[in-house]
Amino acid sequence: MGAKSTQTEVPKNLVVQQITIKQATRGTQDIDGWKTAITQFKSITNPNRVKFYDLIEDIVTDGQIEATWGKRQDQVLNKYLTFKRDGVEDPEINKLLNSSSMRWLIRDLHNAIAYGYTLIYVNSIYLNEEEEQYIIDYNLIPRKHVHPEVGWECISKEQTSATLDFLYKMPPISPYMIWAGDPYDMGLIMKAAQYVIYKRGDFGDWAQFAEMFGAPLRQAFYDGYDDKTRIVLENAMEAMASCSYIVAPKGTDIKFLDAVKGTAGDLYKTLYDACNDEISKTILGNTLTTDPGNNGSRALGEVHAGGENAKNESDQRFILSILNGKLKSILKLFGFNVTGGEIEYVSAGKDWTLLKTKWEVWSGIRQQTPISDDQIYEEFDIRKPDNYEELKALMDLGLNSIATPVKDPLNPPAPKPKNFVNKVIDFFV
């Protein structure tokens, strides 16, 4: 068995129950407020994160933020985890690693990249007998109360002032704490916030522009001394629609000056799209994987996707470093036998285009310098056959290297044995 099947009792909500949690203050966001929030966040004498995280909580309601960060986070959440010891999986621990509560825990840990430093207190880990699923009971410590800077490393009961109420890296609570991220990092959302603020202002002006100039101006004329007709016309114009209108006496000389010509309204859309592009580049490192626009050629899109894949791989390594560090020590506290094992992601399905390119690179390297077969098996996730030595000897009778020999019509080479390695070689040649 990888773990105990009963709940282990520890002090529950030791920290969270003693924190005074207050609702976020919402208001109109502007660039000056954004700068002030950053200044208070970085204060050395009295670091205060309240204004900063109030602003962030409002910023994340933006659709482009939701789309881009959600896309990046899905690459971490939608992968299965496995625990292996000496190459053998532990089904009981795997059940925990792929439970719904573990998914939420990984989500909160991964949010350290977007929101900044993350602190989690694990209350208990137990098996729900009825649902046959492991439950990780934990609390995400509100970031407004956390001061991870050197010299502080504390949780404050009140969000408005930095006080050393709980030293989370010291006993008795430190064994149950998980921390992630850099203490001074404000996260990707902070960098993208300025573009959300500009975009909102632009969008409001754009809406006002559409209201003023998007609908035609209506005109109605009446006899100059007929007030009854004038009142009837005004009421009719008011009831018809929200478009602008003029009610004037007959003979009145009215001139209309064009406020916009051609595509002047596209200026708003240009700024709007530019802000969305900057948000995408900030969070994903590219724009073409979310919006190809007018320049979304396939080749360029693949280049952008490659950069995005690098960020996804970095995120996964970030999560694994935490799971194989602090989380494993907590699992031991709750009876899980994780000694000598590692948590890793289950290999995804094969990308044959990528494998073909990789094989060409490795084949070129092997022609210049020796590479062990074990490296090949590991790199391409191929199972090494049990009778490897026998098959290798047979291969050496026909080939001295992976490189294809020069064909001699008078002395053709001996046929290659039909084994799995040769099938892979033939597939890519």
Image (cartoon, rainbow, N blue to C red):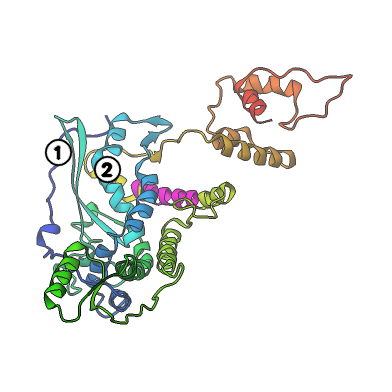
x 39%, y 34%: residue: 85
x 42%, y 68%: residue: 271
Q: Is residue 184 above or below residue 74?
A: below
The residues colored magenta run 308-324
Q: Secondary structure at mark 1?
A: loop
Residue 207: x percent and y percent?
Answer: 31, 66
Magenta stretch holds residue 281: no
Return the disc, 1 or 2, that comes first in the chain's sequence. Answer: 1
Mark 1 and mark 2 residues within 8 Å of each other at the beta carbon = no
Which quadrant of the figure contains the C terminus? top right
The answer to which quarter of the image holds residue 280 is bottom left
Which quadrant of the figure contains the N terminus? top left
Residue labelled with disc 1: 7
In depth, the one of 377 and 210 nearer the eye is 210
Q: Is residue 428 left or right of residue 224?
A: right
Q: Is residue 149 visible?
A: no
Residue labelled with disc 2: 102
Residue type at tag 2: Met
Magenta stretch holds residue 321: yes
Residue type at tag 1: Gln
x 36%, y 54%: residue: 69
Residue 325: x percent and y percent?
Answer: 35, 49
Q: Secondary structure at mark 2?
A: helix
x 80%, y 20%: residue: 413
Q: Tell me the chief SS of the magenta region.
A: helix
